[in-house]
Amino acid sequence: MSQQSPTRKYSSPLRESQAQETRERILRATSDLLNGNAFADISMDDVARSAGVERRTVFRHFATKEALFDAFWVHINQSMNAATLPTTLEELLRSPLDAFSQFDKNEGIIRASLHTPTGHAMRMRTVKARRIAFRTCLEEANLDVNSKNARKVEALFHLLYSASAWETLKDYGGLTGKDAGQVASWAMQALLKAAETDEN
C-alpha cells in the first residue's frame, strides 16, 4: 500500500505582501477615523468603508473589534517610536519628555484613547503591566518600596506620565506637548526627591 506524501503548505510571497498591505490599509483607516473624530465609537463597518475593503476582509485580518484595536494601538506606539514601558528609574523620570511631544503629533488618536470606549478598554488592558514596570523602576529609588511614601509616589507617577496629564496641561495650562513633558518630568523628579528626603 502506497503512503500518501504529506501535504505541502503553499506560500506565496505576493499574496503575503498583499495581505500585509491590506492589513496596513485597515490600520491607517482606523487612524484616519479617530483623528477625524476623536470622540466617535467607530464600528467595523466604518473601518471597512474608510479602508475601501469589504467588511469580511476586515474580519479576515481582525477577528473582533478588540483584536483590531489591540493591533492598532501597537501600530500607533511603533509609529510614534514610543517605548512600551520604562525599565529603569531614569527612563521613567524622562518618559514624558518624548512621549508628550509625540502626543501632539497624534492629537486626535491620543484624545480618542482617553474619551472613547475602545480607547478606555485599551488602557485598562495595559494597567497590570504598567503597575509592575513602575514598581520595578521605583526599586532603584532611595525608598522602602512598601512604605506609604513609595505608594504615593507610584500613584502620582501614573498620573503625571499619562495622556490625561498631557491633555490637562495642554488644555488648561496652555502648554505645548514639549513643554508639558518638561513640566511632568520636573514634577516627577521633585516629588521623588521630596519623598526620599522625608523618608530618610
Image (cartoon, rainbow, N blue to C red):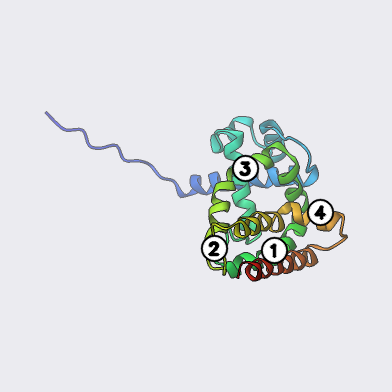
Give the number of the disc on residue 124: 3
The answer to the question of whether label 1 and label 3 lie on touching residues, with beta carbons closer than 8 A, is no
Say if 42 sits above or below 81 in the image.
Answer: above
Q: Quadrant of the N terminus?
A: top left
Residue 187: x and y in percent read 73, 66
Residue type of the residue flagged with mark 4: Thr
Disc sitting over residue 109 in the figure: none
Give the number of the mark in front: 4 or 2. 2
Residue 129 against residue 186 in the figure, above or below = above
The alpha-carbon separation of the residues under discs 1 and 3 comes to: 20 Å
Please tell me which of labels 4 and 2 falls first in the chain. Answer: 2
Q: Which structural element holds mark 4?
A: helix
Kind of element beneath mark 3: helix
Q: CA distance from mark 1 to mark 4?
A: 14 Å
| Label disc, if present, on residue 96 of the rendered structure | 1
Q: Residues within 10 Å of mark 3 (few under 14, many from 20)?
A: few
Of 57 and 103, the residue lying toward us: 103
Question: Which secondary structure lies at badge 1?
Answer: helix
| Foreground pick, 146 / 135 | 146
Q: Which badge, 2 or 1, is on the more N-terminal residue?
A: 1
Quadrant (top left/top right/bottom left/bottom right) for the C terminus: bottom right
Q: Is residue 120 above or below residue 162?
A: above
Q: Is residue 90 left or right of residue 120?
A: left
Identity, as a three-letter code, of the amino acid under mark 3: Met
Q: Residue placed at 57% from the left, 52% from the top?
A: 131
Residue carrying label 2: 144
In the depicted view, which residue is nearer to us: 33 or 122? 122
**Residue matched to label 4:** 168
Q: Would you call the spot at circle 4 few (<14 residues within 10 Å), some (14-19), or many (20 or more)?
A: few
Give the camera-side residue of 50 and 112. 112
**Spatial separation of the CA atoms under disc 2 and disc 1:** 25 Å
Q: Amino acid at mark 1?
A: Pro
